[in-house]
């Protein structure tokens, strides 16, 4: 993330972003969002030499430099009257004339103006700052590193007027406090570093009015209408790293996380490949590893030996204060909070119904009908307590039928849900998987700028990630319950993977490894998104849902679209 400029000053690079896409500038400037993609990383690489600050003095305006042409690198400029700040990559001083030089990756475009507008505007802003400092500055240069070409950009009246107009526009948009809508079907989006967060096509589809229940309208939809491009990578390259060996120690060695037990190396993973770290029970972590993970925004999730999700260590809070203010405002508004909570509960009940419909060999028609009625009642509920009642009754019906999905030959019997502690193996698996799900959604909510602790359905309770539990509702049957079913029915987990304690039942380390492995496989499995039509992993789906919730809280989409399978 770039350094923050002084209050009220607009960085010249932000004018570049604003000219490219007003929404991108708003996300970065007002909401403090930032993400690297291959383009931004290439840009940083190109700047690695010019960003070294040059201590040689630049002559004062009006005085000639000693040598015919003097260069100064990484020159910082700011001007109160313009309200602008910039860092000039390279400043060329020739007599009384100064020329800012901006380094760009890529090839020089074949355009009559020599460069795209965002780049010209950014350079012109630097020229205006130099002029305001008293220098003569009639043109700037963009150096395109891939084609090794210098392109001169004259600061003519048209470009100056456009730059000043964009600056005024940017200030107006930022002050209004309303995020500009996403670009429609724009070729700019696939290259945008914030596309995963912005969700341009998804937001446009939902804000332009999608029916609450997904319908197949492909026969009547005009070609191209409502089309959502697959702009998100279907999966994240980084994966969670779990450490559950009692006495293990997590440290850092260079760019790697190293896990050791009694001096023996158990695992070594590149930091860049770790999305978050999960520590179960008595596992130690070094201060150096903790600091490095926090600096890189890689959360560390702490679990009890039994799998209870106890806490999370992260870096400083996400910068999107505006989103958290909206989250708390909606949570404090009963009708708005109930509407959201209803979407979570109805989504969960409908997904429970789908799981039963797909897996039951007995006749469960009455249960399916009852669940359909409960989902409809949830959608119409007028208060959160009413919703909780509906959810409780639906869960009772669902779990009564859920037990019938386990094959008799496995020896596992499920006679209803119990917890804290679970008193039978199936409930031990379910409790563990629900904790894993809550952890995944805590990480997803945090990464999306939401406060994982403030929910809409689950009331705040000390130490409880209420929002993560809200978001988890629709995924309990889809992810946790289905993994439990498959583990038992395929024989991947067996009765010997459990030990009975004085109170409750625990998994053995081998049992927990089997459950974790099945859980990771499920999260990595791909699914076609029912609304957007593209394929992505379930882990990615969790992040998309958290980001859609953020878009709803910011008033961009009218309803929260619970993820539902058919
Ligand atoms: S993804 Fe598209 S609409 Fe969204 S910020 Fe980027 S360029 Fe703008």
Image (cartoon, rainbow, N blue to C red):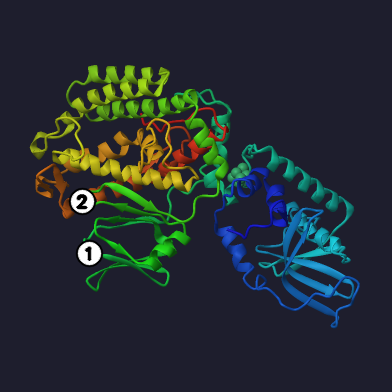
Label 2 within 8 A of ligand 1 by Cβ: no
Local crowd size for mark 2, using a 10 Å CA cut-off: few (<14), some (14–19), many (≥20): many
Position above or below: 195 against 71: above
Is residue 226 in sight in this rendering?
no
Q: Which residue is mark 2?
A: 512
Which quadrant is the C terminus positioned in? top left
**Front in this rendered view, residue 371 or 503:** 503
Location of residue 368 in the rendering, given as x and y in whole percent from the top left corner: 27, 20
Q: Closer to the N terminus: mark 1 or mark 2?
A: 1
Judged from the image, the secondary structure of the residue bearing numbered disc 2 is: helix
Location of residue 249 in the rendering, given as x and y in whole percent from the top left corner: 28, 66
Local crowd size for mark 1, using a 10 Å CA cut-off: few (<14), some (14–19), many (≥20): few
Q: Nearer the viewer, mark 1 or mark 2?
A: 1
Location of residue 319 in the rendering, given as x and y in whole percent from the top left corner: 55, 49
Q: Is residue 118 left or right of residue 161?
A: left
Label 1 within 8 A of ligand 1 by Cβ: no
């Amino acid at each position: 993330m770039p350094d923050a400029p002084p209050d009220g000053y607009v960085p010249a690079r932000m004018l570049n972003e604003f000219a490219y896409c007003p929404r991108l500038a708003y996300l970065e400037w007002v909401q403090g969002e930032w993400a690297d993609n291959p383009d931004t990383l290439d840009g940083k690489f190109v700047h690695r030499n010019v960003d070294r600050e040059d201590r040689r003095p630049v002559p004062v305006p009006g005085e000639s430099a000693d040598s015919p042409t003097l260069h100064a690198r990484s020159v910082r400029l700011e001007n109160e009257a313009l309200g602008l700040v910039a860092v000039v990559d390279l400043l060329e001083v020739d007599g009384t004339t100064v020329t800012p030089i901006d380094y760009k990756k890529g090839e020089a475009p074949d355009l009559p103006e020599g460069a795209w507008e965002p780049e010209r505007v950014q350079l012109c802003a630097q020229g205006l700052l130099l002029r305001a400092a008293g220098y003569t500055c009639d043109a700037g240069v963009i150096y395109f590193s891939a084609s090794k070409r210098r392109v001169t950009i004259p600061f003519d009246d048209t470009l100056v007027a456009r730059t000043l107009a964009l600056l005024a526009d940017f200030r107006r948009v930022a002050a209004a406090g309303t995020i500009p809508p996403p670009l429609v079907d724009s070729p700019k989006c696939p290259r945008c570093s914030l596309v995963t967060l912005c969700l341009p096509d998804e937001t446009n589809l939902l804000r332009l009015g999608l029916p609450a229940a997904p319908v197949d309208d492909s026969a009547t939809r005009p070609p191209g209408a409502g089309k959502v491009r697959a702009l998100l990578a279907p999966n994240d390259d980084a994966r969670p790293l779990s450490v559950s060996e009692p006495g293990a120690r997590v440290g850092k060695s260079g760019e790697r996380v190293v896990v050791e037990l009694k001096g023996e190396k158990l695992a070594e993973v590149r930091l860049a490949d770790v999305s978050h770290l999960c520590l179960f029970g008595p596992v130690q972590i070094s201060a150096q590893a903790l600091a490095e993970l926090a600096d890189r925004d890689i959360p560390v999730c702490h679990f009890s030996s039994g799998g209870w999700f106890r806490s999370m260590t992260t870096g400083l809070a996400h910068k999107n204060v505006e989103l958290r203010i909206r989250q708390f405002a909606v949570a404090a508004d009963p009708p708005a909070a109930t509407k959201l909570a209803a979407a979570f509960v109805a989504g969960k009940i409908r997904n429970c119904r789908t799981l039963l419909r797909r897996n039951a060999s007995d006749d469960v028609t009455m249960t399916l009908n009852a669940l359909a009625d409960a989902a409809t009642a949830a959608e119409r509920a007028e208060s959160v307590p009413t919703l909780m009642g509906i959810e409780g009754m639906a869960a009772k019906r669902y779990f009564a039928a859920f037990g019938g999905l386990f094959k008799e030959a496995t020896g596992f019997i499920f006679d209803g849900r119990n917890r804290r502690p679970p008193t039978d193996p199936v409930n031990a698996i379910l409790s563990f998987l629900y904790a894993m799900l809550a952890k995944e959604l805590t990480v997803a909510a945090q990464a999306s700028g939401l406060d994982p602790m403030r929910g809409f359905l689950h009331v705040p309770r000390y130490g409880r990630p209420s929002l993560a539990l809200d978001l988890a509702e629709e995924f309990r049957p889809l992810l946790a319950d289905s993994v439990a079913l498959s583990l038992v029915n395929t024989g991947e987990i067996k009765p010997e993977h459990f030990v009975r304690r004085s109170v409750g039942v625990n998994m053995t380390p081998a049992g927990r490894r089997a459950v974790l492995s099945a859980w990771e496989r499920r999260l990595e499995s791909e699914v076609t998104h029912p609304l957007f039509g593209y394929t992505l992993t379930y882990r990615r789906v969790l992040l998309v849902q958290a980001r859609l919730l953020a878009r709803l809280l910011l008033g961009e989409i009218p309803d929260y679209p619970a993820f539902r399978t058919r």
